[in-house]
Amino acid sequence: MAVCLSMAMQAGAVDVSSKAKEVTVFTSGAQVTRTATAQVAAGQSEVRIMGLSPYIDSKSVQVKAKGSGLTIMSVSQQKNYVEKSQTDKEVEALKKQKDDISTKISIERTNNEVADAELSFIQANQTITGADQSLSIATLKQTNDYYRERIKTLKLQKIDTDKKIAELEKQKAAIEKQINELNGRKNDEATGMIVVKLNAAAATNCSFEISYVVRNASWTPAYDIRVNNVDEPVQLVYKADIRQNTKEKWDNVKLTLSTANPNVSGEAPVLSSYILKERTYVVYGAAKRSYKPMMMAKSVANETMMDAAMPMELEEEAAAPQVVQSDNMTTKEFKIKMPYTLNSSNQSSQVEIENYKLKATFEYYCAPKLDKDAFLMANVTDWVKLNLMSGDASLFFENTFVGKTRIESTRQNDTLKLSLGRDKSILVTREAVKDYTSTKTLSSKREVERGWKISVKNNKKTAIKLAVHDQMPVSGQSDIEVTSLGTDGASKNETTGELIWKMDLNAGEKKDVTFRYKVKYPKDKNIVVE
């Protein structure tokens, strides 16, 4: 690296800065396009594009140059240990702030010391009697008033000074914390630079377009799902949480988000031969000849493990990722319409991608076996067609946050069910029916019968749709028999035993449903039937 840096410092090298113009952020990594200009002399010269990220993938660097009679001889990516990084500049500015605050603290503490000294002087000289015993009452009163007011002023001054010191110490601690955070992001005090060797037929002003892929940047999807009322479509806001810690600033760039991950190979897998062989084993403690093969095997294993443990050193030499095109059939790109600024802070910046209006049906749901409350549910249809990525979603109903849910892109169901919260105006009860509850013991069997009654009442001023869910037991072995004795019109899932009653309830209306079942099993088995 010292040799590279020495070569870069040779006479004729031109240092230039660049401006980030376009950035495509992948789910892991980003592609940055920058522009720069430089005045080069005739013949061979070297242009160093400074102040870049130290996390550039060297094999992804591409440089285009425009200029009269200009030829690019070579392009290389290097680390610069001389130029201060943006992080270093931020740390220096913070250290200056910290020094200024320390000076202010010292001044305030000096003020306190002066006040303490004056108070000590006053206390030491409060005796006003002496050789002259002819002091008048007026003089004594005047002297006493002076001491009292001066002591009061000094003590109040100390209280005010202590408050200022406490506030300054708080500011100083916050700056120290920020300095430590910034120092934790530094990478051997290095920045990145791209060195372009040129040959020019004559002195010319040339312009450059530089693109490269950089690590330490990513975006993840996030969603807001908003339901204003049951008469409007569901609003789904598709957002991106973007993070970048590349040590370079992207200021007013054309920002594109891509669903691609350039770190994952796009090569289709190819099956190799599937050959079965008899497995051989080495027996420990048998003959001496079994010892050496084991040592050889252990040595090979260690070499393999050592190779596998070197990803950090090999990471920069990875193959350059493919540039994602907007018409790629396997990914999606989102171009942000307005310029965007992202600092290298690793703090999340949220960008809105899309805003969808989705059709939904609303109904109430209750499962009184588990919870006696009814829940308002929004059933969103056709959401799969949006081709969303998996991510967390914040759920809002009537402008109130009601909880978190998750959108799973692998879910095949066309209906997304969202719980919008409890509604206490719908009363639900579930109780055992005594007339249908019995246990009988036969010759070799025990027969248990159960019956349940579910009552629901709509105390709302409007009609509602309600789905009531419950269940019957399902036999898990051949000698346990479960027989339905009536479900009161419920639909039944024979595999799970789930029962569902769909009902319309007018305002103030009450409905009851019942279901019964019988379970028969060997009396020597311990079976618990609810």
Image (cartoon, helix red, strand yellow):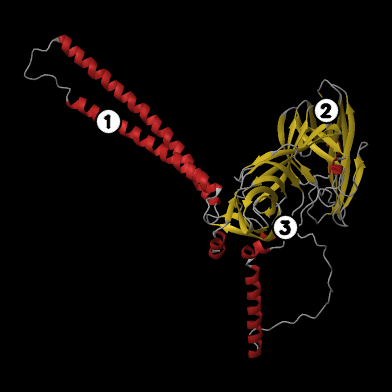
Q: Identify the amino acid type marked 2.
A: Val
The picture places residue 353, in percent across and down from the top left corner, at: 76, 39
Q: Nearer the viewer, residue 336 or 465?
A: 336
Q: Which residue is mark 1?
A: 114
Is 343 displayed left or right of 90 in the figure? Answer: right
Find the distance from the CA under tag 1 to the CA under tag 2.
71 Å
Whether 133 is drawn above or below 463: the answer is above
Q: Quadrant of the C terminus?
A: top right
Q: Nearer the viewer, mark 2 or mark 3?
A: 3
Q: Which residue is mark 2?
A: 230
Residue 263 circle label: 3
* SS label for mark 3: loop
Sequence order check: which comes first, mark 2 or mark 3? 2
Find the distance from the CA under tag 2 to the CA under tag 3.
44 Å
Whether 151 is drawn above or below 332: the answer is above
Q: What residue appears at the point 54 percent right and 59 percent down from the top-left corner?
A: 11
Is 151 displayed left or right of 381 in the figure? Answer: left
